[in-house]
Image (tube, rainbow, N blue to C red):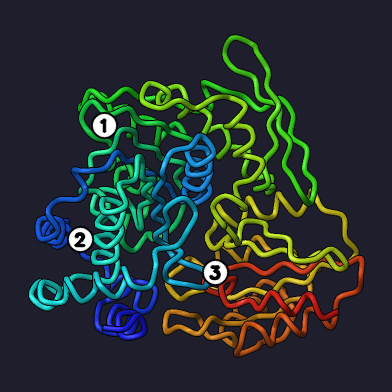
Amino acid sequence: MTYHQAIQYLYNTLPMFTRIGAKAFKPHLKNTEDICNFLGHPEQQIKMIHIAGTNGKGSVSHMLAAIFQQCGYKTGLYTSPHLKDFRERIKVNGQMIDKKSVSAFVKKTKAISEKIRPSFFELTFGMALDYFARQKVEIAIIETGLGGRLDSTNVITPILSVITNIGWDHMDILGNTLKKIAHEKAGIIKKKIPVIIGESLPDTKKVFTDRASKLQAPIFFAQQKLKIVTAQYSHQYLKVIIKDRRGLTTKYLSDLNGAYQQNNILTVLTCIPILQKDFHLPQRKIKLALENVKKITSLGGRWEILSQNPLVALDVAHNEDGMHQLLRQLKNCTYNQLHIVIGMVKDKDISKVIAQLPKEAHYYFTQAQLPRALPSIDLKKMGEAFSLQGASFLKVNDAVKKARDSALPNDLILVCGSVFVVGEVNKNLFHQK
């Protein structure tokens, strides 16, 4: 089986959330358990950290991976979805899984796949576990796909669980209140395994403390352990000064320079004392890792700056809370006119997102090339209902080109609304002007 054949099989034969949405979600763990059993239980051979949350879990996953790599540990990283290449989902020491390993795994598991009919996510998570075990990683960072309790990744028993925050997303599957969503995310808390909570509200905090108490899991709230004293943004770095409970302050730079990364940094740093019981993580290497997360792990799409004149930023913000944080980021920027290229998928609460968007911006409504994408003309109509003015484009890069050609040097172009829209952007467009 060639790599191309393997990818076609994964994309076209298996139910895929990216393509068809909630119909691809399997509300049980049996398929993943069967795959792990078939593979000889790789999940029992690896030390892992399990990360859930509405927003921020990708950034936290990459920060932790960067720290372990910088400290010399062979590090696995499993995240989703990908931006450009399927293999971005499965990395060891920042390097994507090789094509031969993908095709060999699909060939090896074809018989059991045809028997139990797993989803795309179930099988590809099995691929990650199998690859990490074969590579003999010393630690693997595992990001949930959706929710937590019934997410395929929840077959693992980690050394640490992390829940970044709770916000409005995937309500059709996770529930229509923050308490219900928190209950699903809290499903990753395991008996006697420590758990870090990045951000919480009074309603969600009790969900976490009750679950942790029931399972005798030590629980730590990042915002009680550490405080941001000051935060300063530039196009290269986010500089923060953080104070601990003893009153000691430490300065950190992060190349994940979105203002919204402040809470993610607190979450990561709260993990460190627990992880230091099993790993040697020197402070100077932690600092160096946070300064170079993008370089170490190849993370993109988080306030990713493509050019300066005009300023062009890509951000995967795609739900109500994510957009709120992104708009806070815009307040740190100086620009003349704002140009927003936006596309969304059908199963988001779109009105809650676009209701926040600034009316004075020029809009370029577009759509990613996948069935879940909301047609750009429909998004344009929804935008007009909120007094957002602009044109619609069937292709992402047509919208991006129009924004590029319309923008003046002191303007800002923002591409957002969907991971899939950001993934389709041709970055070379900004080396031609």
Mark with earlier residue (3, 2)? 2
Badge 2 crowding class, 10 Å Cα cut-off, few under 14, some 14 to 19, many 20 or more, is few
Which amino acid does the dot numbered 1 rest on? Answer: Arg
At which x and y percent is residue 220?
A: 41, 24
Residue 314 or 331: which is nearer the viewer? 314
User: Residue at horizontal 49%, vertical 54%?
Assistant: 94
Query: Quick check: marks 1 and 3 in contact, CB under 8 Å?
Result: no
Mark 1 lies on a secondary structure that is helix
Residue 197 or residue 389, whichever sits in front:
197
* Residue 257 sits above or below residue 34 on the image: above
Q: Is residue 66 left or right of residue 120?
A: right
Determine whether the residue tagged by mark 2 lies in a helix, strand or loop.
loop
Residue mark closest to the camera, 1 vs 3: 3
Which mark is first along the chain, 2 or 1? 2
Percent from the top left, x then y, of residue 258? 68, 49
Q: Residue at 75% across / 54% down in the picture?
A: 330
For label 3, the residue is 418
Q: Could you give the CA–CA distance between mark 1 and mark 3, rounded to whole angstroms? A: 32 Å
Type of residue at label 2? Pro
Q: Callout 3, which amino acid? A: Ser
Q: Residue at 38% x, 21% y: name it.
A: 277
Residue denoted by label 2: 27
Q: Residues within 10 Å of mark 1 (few under 14, many from 20)?
A: some
Q: Earlier in the sequence, mark 1 or mark 3?
A: 1
Q: Is residue 335 left or right of residue 161?
A: right
The residue labelled by disc 1 is 211
